[in-house]
Image: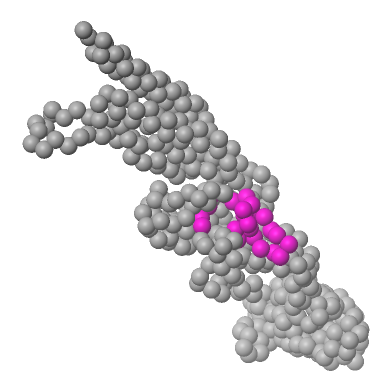
């Protein structure tokens, strides 16, 4: 049986060298997970034999176990490179439609706007409504971005304003002199342009339309009129009122909006010569105050935009994919999905840095980065192979000695058999 022992040892050592060689060959493969050969002894059954009298018949490779320890993260600066810092796998749809999983995040954006791996598999994630930032589906699907055509323009619906109106301002019409005692000099009228601000809003075709707001103090305490023109014949667009503490008390925003605000009717001509109808814009005034300091605008923003081309993508730690467009817009376009398994070592490697589900791995548990036990994503970085090259070289030398020792047992057994055959 010694020949069997030696042969099994040679086979096991050879298999071990194969595993070590595979690890060394993939020392620089992104997202690669090292494997190790695990051995078990082989014993012939002996019915009725004493428990300690059986002699083993060699060794066998019980398993080639993958080691799913975390690899180092290397910063690349490429925003489409993504590393998982923690547990989880990227979910893929392979070209044949089947599912696969990977730790390699060196993704590419093809001409159709699909996020893909080097092998052509599409990366899966959850679609996001850009307006609300919420998911629009519960099942992951291929991520796609409008790279081949611009995003449509969005008409402005709301302008958000935050500014302070000077509580020391007098009636804009002026204050006449009083004889006293003591006499006070006349206060001249305040030009309408003294307190004003402007912003560009967008019509339904994405053409910028300038809107200017002017504020004039009235003779009534804590009251200001709002105008959108310097023409003295232009009507007031609303009245802003405050309480004695400088907090806004009106106007109340029209339904369905809440808080304080007023509605402006914006004529898109002359910037847009296509004779578009006027559209309404709600001016949100919730953060307007009246304190004894100079007029100052701290925020003025609006929610419309022109059409724009995709210029870049950034992936956040939560997997949220923020797309940047040439019109200055940055909005969420999707969220990367992750999967995990109760027994990752049960996954079957199929090449191209991919694994597929097996009965031993169990079914995938899907989620998003940073949720539960899923790891966080690092954009602009890649996860290195977790192969310890120094340890693998030492293991290779050990396996080589094991191979030599098993070969020596075969040589020795051959010499013993030769001695027995030559007995006379």
Q: Quadrant of the N terminus?
A: top left
Instruction: Work out whether residue 205 or residue 247 is closer to the camera in this orientation and state it.
Output: 205
Q: Quadrant of the C terminus?
A: top left
Instruction: Work out whether residue 363 or residue 234 is closer to the camera in this orientation and state it.
Output: 363
Instruction: Work out whether residue 264 or residue 269 is closer to the camera in this orientation and state it.
Output: 269
Tell me residue 285's x, y (percent).
69, 79
Tell me residue 214's x, y (percent).
83, 80
Dividing the picture into quadrants, the one containing residue 179 is bottom right
Q: Is residue 264 above or below residue 296?
A: below
Q: Is residue 220 above or below residue 422?
A: below
Magenta segment main secondary structure: loop
Query: Could you tell me which residue is drawn at 38 percent across and 31 percent down?
Result: 11
Residue 104 highlighted magenta (yes or no): yes
Its colouring scheme is one colour
Residue 382 highlighted magenta (yes or no): no
Dividing the picture into quadrants, the one containing residue 300 is bottom right
Tell me residue 218's x, y (percent).
79, 86
Instruction: Write down the region rendered in magenta.
Output: 100-122
Left or right, 52 with reference to 64: left
Query: Could you tell me which residue is drawn at 25 percent across and 14 percent down?
Result: 421
């Amino acid at each position: 049986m010694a020949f069997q022992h030696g042969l099994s040892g040679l086979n096991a050592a050879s298999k071990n060298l194969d595993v070590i060689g595979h690890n060394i060959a993939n020392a620089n493969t992104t997202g690669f997970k090292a494997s190790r050969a695990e051995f078990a002894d082989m014993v012939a059954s002996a019915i009725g034999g004493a428990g300690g009298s059986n002699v083993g018949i060699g060794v066998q490779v019980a398993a080639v176990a993958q080691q799913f320890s975390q690899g180092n993260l290397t910063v690349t600066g490429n925003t489409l490179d993504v590393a998982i810092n923690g547990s989880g796998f990227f979910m893929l749809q392979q070209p044949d439609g089947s599912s696969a999983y990977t730790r390699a995040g060196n993704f590419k954006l093809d001409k159709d706007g699909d996020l893909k791996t080097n092998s052509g598999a599409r990366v899966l994630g959850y679609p996001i409504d850009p307006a609300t930032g919420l998911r629009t589906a519960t099942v992951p699907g291929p991520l796609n971005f409008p790279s081949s055509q611009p995003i449509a323009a969005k008409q402005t619906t709301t302008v958000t304003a935050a500014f302070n109106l000077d509580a020391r301002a007098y009636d804009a019409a002026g204050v006449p002199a009083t004889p006293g005692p003591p006499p006070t000099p006349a206060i001249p009228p305040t030009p309408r342009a003294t307190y004003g601000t402007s912003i560009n809003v967008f019509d339904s075709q994405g053409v910028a339309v300038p809107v200017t707001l002017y504020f004039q103090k009235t003779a009534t305490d804590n009251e200001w009129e709002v105008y959108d023109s310097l023409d003295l014949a232009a009507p007031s667009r609303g009245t802003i009122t405050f309480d004695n503490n400088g907090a806004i008390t009106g106007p109340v925003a029209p339904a369905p909006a809440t808080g304080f605000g007023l509605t402006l009717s914006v004529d898109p001509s002359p910037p847009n010569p296509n004779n578009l109808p006027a559209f309404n814009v709600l001016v949100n005034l919730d953060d307007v105050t009246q304190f004894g300091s100079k007029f100052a605008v701290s925020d003025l923003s609006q929610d419309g935009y022109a059409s724009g081309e995709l210029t870049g993508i950034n992936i956040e730690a939560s997997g949220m994919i923020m797309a940047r467009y040439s019109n200055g817009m940055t909005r969420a376009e999707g969220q990367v999905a992750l999967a995990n398994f109760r027994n990752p070592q049960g996954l079957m490697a199929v090449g191209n840095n991919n694994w597929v589900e097996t009965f031993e791995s169990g079914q995938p548990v899907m989620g998003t980065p940073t949720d539960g036990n899923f790891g966080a994503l690092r954009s602009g970085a890649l996860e290195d192979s977790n192969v310890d090259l120094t340890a693998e070289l030492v293991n290779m030398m050990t396996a080589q000695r094991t191979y030599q020792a098993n070969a020596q047992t075969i040589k020795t057994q051959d010499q013993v058999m030769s001695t027995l055959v030559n007995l006379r």
